[in-house]
Each structure stands twice: as C-alpha cells, then as structure tokens.
Image: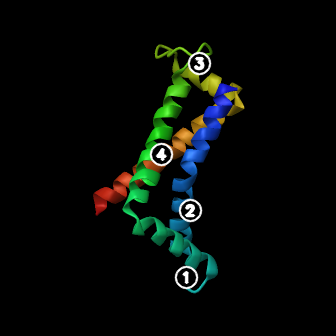
C-alpha cells in the first residue's frame, strides 16, 4: 500500500512538468493557426511568464520525484535501505509489483525531464 501511495504522489508531482513538456512538443509540431498549437503556446507562455513556475514545476518537483523514486526503489520489503541489494533483485522487485513499475517509470520520466531542462538551461 505504501508503494502505491508513493507512485500516486510521484505522478501528481510530475504532472505539471509533463504537461509543460507535452505543450512544448505540441506547440512545435503544429502551426500557429491550429487551435491545439495556440493552446499549447498559451500554456508555455503561462509557465514562462512566471519565473517561479520554471524553477519549482520544472526543476524542484522532478528532482523531488527522482530522489523519492530512487529511495523507494532501493528500499527492501521491510522498509530498510538495502544498497547491497543486487541489480537483479531490484529489477525483479520492480517487475513483480505494478506499483513499483509506476514508481520506476515516474522516476525515469523525472530524470529525462531534468536532463532536458538542464540541457536547455545550459544552451541559453
């Protein structure tokens, strides 16, 4: 039950960044005259007009999801940190539990979002 709660919280924390990334893709794929592209552009500008949204929603929340996810994945069934746990055992635990698959997916998505944001910041 605890893993399900962690997965739900991670998905909720990751949602604003995922919506922003989807809006950026839609904005770049569509022309300015199409309704979805205009709506996506307005959403991107809504994020960009407020500097705190970029830092909190695109950096802090995905980083929190990444740290929480890695911590949850590294825990054993008793809730104790198990850094000596082998990679095979960790992957087997992820495959065996659907909540752990959600946690692993959200953690991977957070890592990808952070890489994209950091690379974009470095390019500017």
Residue 63 horizontal/vertical position (percent): 44, 42
Q: CA distance from mark 2 to mark 3?
A: 34 Å
Q: In this figure, which residue is indicated by the disc labeled 1?
A: 31
| Total labels drawn | 4
Mark 3: give few (<14), some (14-19) or many (20+) Cα within 10 Å: few
Identify the mark nearer the N-term, 2 or 4. 2
Mark 2: give few (<14), some (14-19) or many (20+) Cα within 10 Å: some
70 is higher (above) or lower (below) than 25? above
Quarter in which the N terminus is drawn: top right
Identify the mark nearer the N-term, 3 or 4. 4
Identify the mark nearer the N-term, 4 or 1. 1
Q: CA distance from mark 3 to mark 4?
A: 26 Å
Q: CA distance from mark 4 to mark 1?
A: 29 Å
Closer to us: mark 2 or mark 4?
Answer: 4
* Residue at 63% from the left image edge and 28% from the top image edge: 94
Q: In this figure, which residue is indicated by the disc labeled 2?
A: 22
Mark 1: give few (<14), some (14-19) or many (20+) Cα within 10 Å: few
């Amino acid at each position: 039950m605890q893993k399900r709660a962690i997965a739900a919280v991670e998905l909720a924390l990751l949602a604003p960044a995922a919506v922003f990334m989807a809006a950026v893709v839609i904005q770049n794929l569509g022309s300015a005259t199409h309704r979805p592209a205009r709506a996506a552009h307005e959403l991107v500008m809504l994020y960009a007009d407020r500097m705190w949204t970029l830092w909190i929603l695109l950096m802090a929340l995905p980083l929190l999801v990444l740290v929480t996810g890695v911590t949850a994945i590294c825990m054993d069934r008793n809730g104790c940190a198990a850094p000596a746990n082998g990679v095979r055992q960790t992957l087997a635990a992820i495959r065996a539990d659907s909540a752990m698959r959600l946690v692993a997916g959200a953690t991977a998505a957070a890592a990808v979002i952070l890489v994209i944001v950091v690379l974009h910041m470095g390019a500017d």
